[in-house]
Amino acid sequence: TTTTTTTKDDFKEVKKMKKTKKMNFFERAASGVNSLLLDSTIRSRASRELSNAKDKFYSLKLPSLFLRTSTKSTAVGFNEKDDGSTCDLQVGDGKPYLDSPAFLRTQLWESAMKKYSSKHGEGEVNGEEDELGEVVDEREEKRDTDDTEDFETLIERDLRRTFPHHPSFKSAKGINKMRRLLLAYRDYDPSVGYCQGMPFIVGILALYMNESDAFQTLLFIMSKSTRNAREIYEENGIGLKRTFSKLESLLQCENKRLSAHLQKFKVGPMMYASGWILTCFASDFTTRFSCRVMDVIIANANMDFTYGDFITNVAVSILNEATEDLLAIGSDEDGEKGEEIVFEKLVEYIRHEPQRWDGERLNRILTLAIHSLSERVKACREIERVTNTIV
């Protein structure tokens, strides 16, 4: 009897192990598998892709699977010394797992999208008629040949300026992948079509996902019922202006001194935050930073916040970090030189200084933004309610 019971238990365990092999790393972790470090696939792939891990990877326990070390990369966009085999991965609301194998980000995003689709159904991600309203029904009628040609010209112009130093986009293969994704979205949602900044969003997705998964994730980011980034890219610019207003109001709620200082010298979000908002910080900061922002947007698929909410959240955290430096600009000494000079100095600082901060400082800022997400989303909803009431 004992032997029979043991055999049955063994059979169940083997069946369970076969099932887990079909899951990726994060799906297995969520299922409570405690021997991930013994998994031959994870070990061999990490060995190939983490040549600079200095053998620390295999000595760590599950909660500390990835290396948590300081990073001092200060290059804007892509640092050519970074070969792209590792990334700073944001899982949940804890500290980032620095220098993780890059393929784990792919698995993180794929897992998040699978989990969201299984909970809400494919239609929520694909974008049914209710999501885009009349746009879906009338896409063929609204598409104009001249507009289509103009979009293609703009896309071609911007493609070469998107991550120009990244090895993945120096080849025709990488550029073609971005082009197909942008053209696909243009055809999918012609009322938005194409807008500057979108190649950076698409580029981030293309770095870690195949085209099909990248497009589905792009729809998740853009769709009105999910992250609603499409409002930022709408032709009338109302969504972008609304995000500027949200940023200004949130800063005023949290940091009255800095808000009053910037208002005094007429420095508004339009002067410095357009690139942050339109490109998920990718045009101004390192890909390690912008991709970690994208981790939060994608991997928390079942949390209720918009793309604009989180970008605003991060922007306010950056400004809060820079408070003392910004208040020092426009002191009595600087003030005597005239408001115009102070204005230029403030804009210059905000646009260029934060991207020079070391990786450790930027990681701390982003961690604080993640911890403040729920509270700030509530504040954003209240700001929107008051704004809509006034309008």
Image: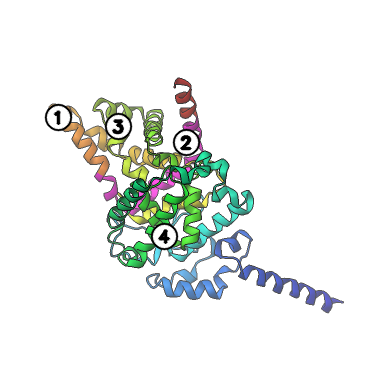
Nearer the camera: disc 2 or disc 4: 4
- Quadrant of the image containing the C terminus: top left
Q: Secondary structure at mark 4?
A: helix
Q: Which residue is mark 2?
A: 376
Disc 3 or 4, which lies upstream in sequence? 4
Q: CA distance from mark 3 to mark 4?
A: 32 Å
Residue beneath label 3, please? Answer: 268
- Horizontally, residue 117 falls left or right of residue 169, namely right
Tell whether 101 sits left or right of 19.
left
Between residue 22 and residue 356, name the one nearer to us. Answer: 22
Residue farthest to the top, as pictured:
390
Q: Which residues are magenta?
A: 352-381
State the predominant SS element of the stretch in magenta. helix
Q: Which mark is residue 206?
A: 4
Q: Residues at badges 2 and 4 in contact (C-beta under 8 Å)?
A: no
Counting labels gives 4
In the image, residue 80 lies in the stretch drawn in magenta = no
Indicate the position of residue 129 as horizontal and vertical percent values. 56, 43
x, y (%) of residue 53? 40, 69
Quadrant of res 181:
bottom left
Helix, strand or loop at label 2? It is: helix
Comparing 388 with 288, the one in front is 388
* Mark 2 to mark 1 CA distance (whole Å): 35 Å
What residue type is disc 2 on?
Arg
Q: Residue furthest left?
A: 337
In the rendering, which numbered label is found on residue 276? none
Q: Residue farthest to the bottom?
A: 3
